[in-house]
Each structure stands twice: as C-alpha cells, then as structure tokens.
Image (cartoon, rainbow, N blue to C red):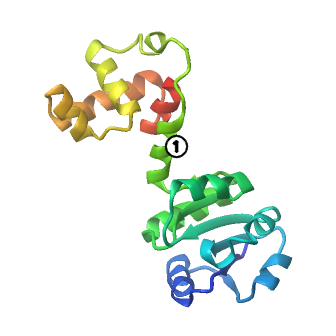
C-alpha cells in the first residue's frame, strides 16, 4: 500500500519522506487530496483542518500537527482519523504510528494516552477485588501507577527506590495480566 503525504509545509514532507523510506506519493493540492479514497494518508493538520472530516471518512489517516494538543486529538479521532501526533516527532514514533494504523488499530502520541487515561472516570467497581492478588505494597504502587505517576514520583511518595517501584510494577503487571501502565489504568477504571 502506498503512503500519501500532504502538507503545505515542504520541510515536513521532506522530513517524513526521509523517515518512511518506502514508496510514497506526494499530493500537492487539497482538491486532489479530497478525491482520494481507500488510501493511507499522512497529513499536516494545519494544511487541511477545514477539510479533514471529508478526507478521514474515505481513508486511513494519520494526522500530524506542529502544535499537538489533547483537544485536537479528541476532535480528529472523533472524525475517524486512525492516529494523531506531533509533526516533528522522533522517527521511531512515526514508524510505529504507520505500522499500528496499517494493522487497523488506533495510534496516539504517548503523552496523550496518559492524558486520556486520566480523564476516564473511575467507576463504582470494587478496585479492592481487582487488586486482591497483590501484596499491600503492590496495591499502593498499582494505585499510584494507575494515576500515571512516574516510577520516581512513586518512589519519593512511598520512600523507596525507583528500582523497587519497577520491580513491584513488573509483578503487578504479571499478576493482573496487563502489559503496561495504560493496561493497568484501564483495568482499574
């Protein structure tokens, strides 16, 4: 599948080309972009924000933005975009986004995942039952991890080392059958 790039900023196009290193097509005019269907498109948010809904409805789209923010992320994802991130993100993030979207999954810049998890309201489910298999210290660490605190923040709060927090986190993820902080936070919400 070809990747189509669109931006009115030539430096972004060049940067994305250098990172992707695969067969790509560059679209130069919005009218041409609006005619495309059933394709994988990477585009600059500022170049087509007024036409974004129409583009996203017919294609798999990764929206990149020089000044990404959580509200725009929510907006473009609600339109049906498959991903949203920083237009100048590191190359491994861009490659990861492309691979994720090609697998028909949603990709979001990692910082925004944490922000979205924090917005998920806690339900009335009994968290104690979910944490029943953990030791008391692991429960404390699990609850702090689910609040998206860093290992260092948790270590300071509990007066233990970051290495100890990491060891507890490994055990927590194993015992609860989750992969990472995001999985833990979703498990506890």
Label 1: state its secondary structure: helix
Q: Residue at the spot x=47%, y=15% of the render?
A: 127
Q: Foreground residue, 136 or 23?
A: 136
Q: Foreground residue, 75 or 174?
A: 75
Q: Is residue 134 left or right of residue 64?
A: left
Q: Is residue 157 left or right of residue 5?
A: left
**As displayed, is residue 172 above or below residue 88?**
above
**As displayed, is residue 31 above or below residue 106?**
below
Q: Foreground residue, 188 or 66?
A: 66
**Percent x, y of residue 151:** 26, 38
Choose top left, top right, bottom left or bottom right for residue 172. Answer: top left
Choose top left, top right, bottom left or bottom right for residue 21. Answer: bottom right
Q: Is residue 54 left or right of residue 115?
A: right
**Percent x, y of residue 41:** 70, 72
Binning the other alpha carbons within 10 Å of mark 1 as few (below 14), some (14 to 19) or many (20 upward) gives few
Q: Which residue is mark 1?
A: 116
Can you see residue 88? yes
The quarter of the rendered structure image containing the N terminus is bottom right
Q: Is residue 48 left or right of residue 126?
A: right
Can you see residue 180? no
**As displayed, is residue 96 above or below residue 178?**
below
**Percent x, y of residue 47:** 64, 79
Number of numbered discs visible in the structure rendering: 1
**Percent x, y of residue 157:** 20, 30
Q: Residue at the spot x=50%, y=47% of the render?
A: 113
**As displayed, is residue 79 above or below residue 9?**
above
Q: Residue at the spot x=52%, y=31% of the render?
A: 186
Q: Residue at the spot x=64%, y=72% of the render?
A: 42
């Amino acid at each position: 599948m070809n990747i189509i790039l669109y931006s009115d900023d030539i430096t972004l196009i060049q940067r994305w080309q250098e990172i992707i290193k695969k067969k790509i097509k560059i679209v130069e005019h919005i009218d041409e972009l609006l005619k495309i269907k059933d394709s994988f498109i990477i585009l600059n948010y500022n170049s087509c924000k007024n036409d974004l809904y129409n583009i996203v409805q017919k294609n798999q789209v990764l929206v990149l933005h020089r000044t990404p923010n959580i509200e725009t992320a929510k907006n473009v994802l609600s339109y049906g975009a498959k991903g949203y991130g920083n237009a100048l993100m590191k190359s491994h993030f861009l490659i990861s986004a492309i691979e994720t979207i090609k697998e028909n999954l949603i990709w979001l810049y990692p910082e925004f995942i944490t922000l979205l998890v924090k917005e998920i309201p806690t339900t009335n489910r009994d968290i104690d039952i979910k944490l029943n298999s953990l030791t008391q210290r692991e429960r404390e660490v699990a609850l702090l991890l689910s609040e998206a605190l860093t290992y260092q923040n948790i270590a300071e709060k509990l007066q233990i080392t970051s290495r100890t927090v990491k060891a507890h986190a490994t055990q927590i993820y194993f015992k609860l059958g989750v992969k990472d902080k995001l999985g833990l936070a979703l498990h506890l919400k």
